[in-house]
């Protein structure tokens, strides 16, 4: 089996977020904070849609629990970050056009993504690439969409006023947890402690601060391929620090980083799970997030 065939077979086996379940019509009975109805567009990101659809489902569950409507513009794909970071501006330009067209054609108040990295790309790269191609109209539309697109913890805290996950979301997760702060969310979006603040207010959690929490895990997209030895050393340091906490779960806000850290932990035979913080917030006593040494499971719906 050649590389192309293997890739096709992998894609066929990955469960994707069902569009028929993710696209939801406006419902006037839904109410959010102070009775305000918000129509929120989900930007699932390509890695979540392709490999971690449970994170998208958890994001939808949280927002609908608060009474908001969620729509899923079905033509969305990638933010173009991996193209732009590798210098492929021409390819990235086409991806950016698709993103703008996908979201510009839908009626929504704000958009949300369970990824600081992808939201950072929208805000710091898309308009720049469009202008490099002389497309000012696209640049302006990209800026407008980016200005209304938020990382999940930004949306919950800054827009929806969520400060206590247990009291306001009913979140429950009786596990020992540590937290990794991803680079783009921390350095480009300025998320600060938003994600960990929400996690620490989940009922039942025992939280231990991670040494070197703000240090890169070594993924960096294509960096992990182009500089594999350096990347491997960085993620091994991160895995050492995770295990030193004694936690059963390492959480964070970017699936790419959690995939990298989880891979390093798995290769050394560790039982520590990596779980996106959206899944922890979505977990409740009635519908708990179940973890074991083999898989993470959250039944929603």
Image (cartoon, helix red, strand yellow):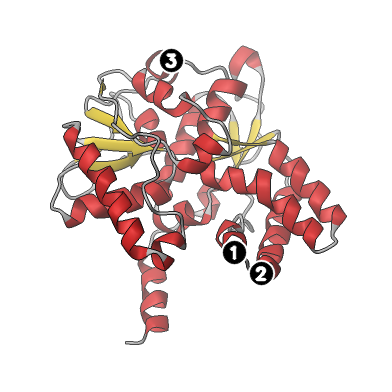
Residue mark closest to the camera, 2 vs 3: 2
Which residue shows up at 44% across the image and 28% down it?
195
Q: Can residue 23 be seen?
A: no
Q: Say above or below: 7 vs 176.
A: below
Rounded to the nearest angstrom, the CA distance separating label 2 from label 3 is 42 Å
The earlier-in-sequence mark between 1 and 2 is 1
Callout 1 touching callout 3 (CB < 8 Å): no
Given contact means CB atoms under 8 Å apart, are the residues at marks 1 and 2 in contact? Answer: yes
Residue designated by label 3:
164
Which residue is at the front of the view, 167 or 47? 47
Left or right: residue 228 compared with residue 168: left
Of the image marks 2 and 3, the number of the one nearer the N terminus: 2
| Front label number (1 vs 3) | 1
Disc 1 from disc 3: Cα separation: 38 Å
Furthest toward the left, the residue is 269
Q: Distance between the residues labelled 1 and 2?
A: 7 Å
Q: Can residue 190 be seen in this view?
A: yes
**Depth check: 184 or 151 in front?**
184
Determine the secondary structure under disc 1: helix
Q: Residue 231's spot in the image, x, y percent?
A: 35, 57
Q: Residue at x 18, y 39 (%)?
A: 243
Q: Name the residue under label 1.
A: 83
Numbered disc 2: secondary structure:
helix
The residue that label 2 is drawn on is 91
The tag earlier along the polypeptide, 1 or 3, is 1
Residue 226, picture quadrant: bottom left
The foreground one among 138 and 285 is 138
Q: Residue at x 54, y 21 (%)?
A: 157
Asked whether, in this view, residue 101 is left or right of residue 264, the answer is right
């Amino acid at each position: 089996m050649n590389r192309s065939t293997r890739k096709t077979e992998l894609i066929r086996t990955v469960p994707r977020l069902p569009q028929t379940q993710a696209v939801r019509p406006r419902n006037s009975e839904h109410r959010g904070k102070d009775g305000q109805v918000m129509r929120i567009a989900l930007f699932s990101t390509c890695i979540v849609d392709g490999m971690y659809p449970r994170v998208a489902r958890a994001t939808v569950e949280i927002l609908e629990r608060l009474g908001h409507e969620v729509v899923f513009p079905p033509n969305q794909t990638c933010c173009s970050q991996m193209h732009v970071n590798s210098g492929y501006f021409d390819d990235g330009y086409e991806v950016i056009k698709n993103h703008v067209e996908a979201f510009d054609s839908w009626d929504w108040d704000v958009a949300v993504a369970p990824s600081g990295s992808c939201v950072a790309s929208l805000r710091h790269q898309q308009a720049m690439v469009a202008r490099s191609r002389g497309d000012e109209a696209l640049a302006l539309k990209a800026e407008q969409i980016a200005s209304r697109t938020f990382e999940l913890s930004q949306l919950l805290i800054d827009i929806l006023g969520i400060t206590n996950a247990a009291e306001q979301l009913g979140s429950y997760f009786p596990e020992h947890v540590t937290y990794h702060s991803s680079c783009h969310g921390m350095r480009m979006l300025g998320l600060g402690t938003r994600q960990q603040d929400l996690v620490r207010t989940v009922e039942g959690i025992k939280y231990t601060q991670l040494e070197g929490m703000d240090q890169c895990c070594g993924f960096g997209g294509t960096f992990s391929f182009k500089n594999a030895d350096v990347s491997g050393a960085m993620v091994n340091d991160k895995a050492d620090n995770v295990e030193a906490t004694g936690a059963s779960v390492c959480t964070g806000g970017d699936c790419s980083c959690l995939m990298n850290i989880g891979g390093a932990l798995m290769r050394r035979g560790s039982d520590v799970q990596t779980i996106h913080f959206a899944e922890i917030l979505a977990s409740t006593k009635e519908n708990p997030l179940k973890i074991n040494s083999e898989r993470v499971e959250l039944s929603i719906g």
